[in-house]
């Protein structure tokens, strides 16, 4: 079994943990490959570009926060990802630094369990070619630098849902419901729920609310505006700029993300810990 290691090089504690991890693997003669930018920072000569890691490795280890895990998962090609939290919030990263080595050992012993997470696939025509982009958390279309308020027109399976005058539209998975969508007022959805949530960003009508839909739906979004360029982001990464009336089709991807599960914690605990639920009641939690 060979491990791929991806590190948030902006965090010194993540680099320190990577050095400790490499030493642990080396002593046990366990094969590993370090992502190129991480290897350069760690001064390791054996490395591969992140785009090539899935061809050489069986399991990925992400050392950072949720952003590092999102980046890692995009290149894992459905191979298991061990997310170690060296960031702040850590909704997606299942393991603390202290839990990292036991988690790796369970993977080596083939006793670990996997959380399968659905992804979104956004399709848009760029020139003469249809491009597809995947997202574990969300697909977001924003007004960007457009000086006025555009209208976002949304169809579900070809039927008009509504036209939203807003600063943008977020389409999120249940996994991504605790990310940008939650910040914009969207609901928290338990993982593995077979739904998506559509959340307008700063809508210019008080009656507009987020809507939860089946993940079997086909979502079509276009921007009704006389001019301008509108960013299409997937998991926070700019993919392309959309022109007026250009159509984006979003549906459930056939490819899922496999996260190595931490069996010592549950989702309710995550909500209490990360969102500080119940603290105001001073109930000893």
Image: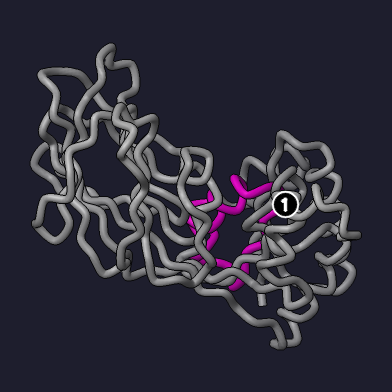
* Identity of the residue drawn at 87% across and 53% down: 282
Which residue in the protein does label 1 denote?
274
Q: Which range of residues does the magenta coloring cover? A: 49-75
83 or 245, which lies in front? 245
51 or 207, which lies in front? 207
Q: Quadrant of the N terminus?
A: bottom right
Q: Is residue 30 visible?
A: yes
Residue 202 horizontal side relative to residue 24, left or right: left
* Identity of the residue drawn at 14% across and 42% down: 247
Note whether 256 is above or below 170 in the view shown.
below
Residue 217 horizontal side relative to residue 69, left or right: left
63 or 223, which lies in front? 223
| 57 part of magenta stretch | yes
Q: Quadrant of residue 230?
A: top left
Residue 133 on image: x %, y %: 32, 50
Residue 73 on image: x %, y %: 52, 58
């Amino acid at each position: 079994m060979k491990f791929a290691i991806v590190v948030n090089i902006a965090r010194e504690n993540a680099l320190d943990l990577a050095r400790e991890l490499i030493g642990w693997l080396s002593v046990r003669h366990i094969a590993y490959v370090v992502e190129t930018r991480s290897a350069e920072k760690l001064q390791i000569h054996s490395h591969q570009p992140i785009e090539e890691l899935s061809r050489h490795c069986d399991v990925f280890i992400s050392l950072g926060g949720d952003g590092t895990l999102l980046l890692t998962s995009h290149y894992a090609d459905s191979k298991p990802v061990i997310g170690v939290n060296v960031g702040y919030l850590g909704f997606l990263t299942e393991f603390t630094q202290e839990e990292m080595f036991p988690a790796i050992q369970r993977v080596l012993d083939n006793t670990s369990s996997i959380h399968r997470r659905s992804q979104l696939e956004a399709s848009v025509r760029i020139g003469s070619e249809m491009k597809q982009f995947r997202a574990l958390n969300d697909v977001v279309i924003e007004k960007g630098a457009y000086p006025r308020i555009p209208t976002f027109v949304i169809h579900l399976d070809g039927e008009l849902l509504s036209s939203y005058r807003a600063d943008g539209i977020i389409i999120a998975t249940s996994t991504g419901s605790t990310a940008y969508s939650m910040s914009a007022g969207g609901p928290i959805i338990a993982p593995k729920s077979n739904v998506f949530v559509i959340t307008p960003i700063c809508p210019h009508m008080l009656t507009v609310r987020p809507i939860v839909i089946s993940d079997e739906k086909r979502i079509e979004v276009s921007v009704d505006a006389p001019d301008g360029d509108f960013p299409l982001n997937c998991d926070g990464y700019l993919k392309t700029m959309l022109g007026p009336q250009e159509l984006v089709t979003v549906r459930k991807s056939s490819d899922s993300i496999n996260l190595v599960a931490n069996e010592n914690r549950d989702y309710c605990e995550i909500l209490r810990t990360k969102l500080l639920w119940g603290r105001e009641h001073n109930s000893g939690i």
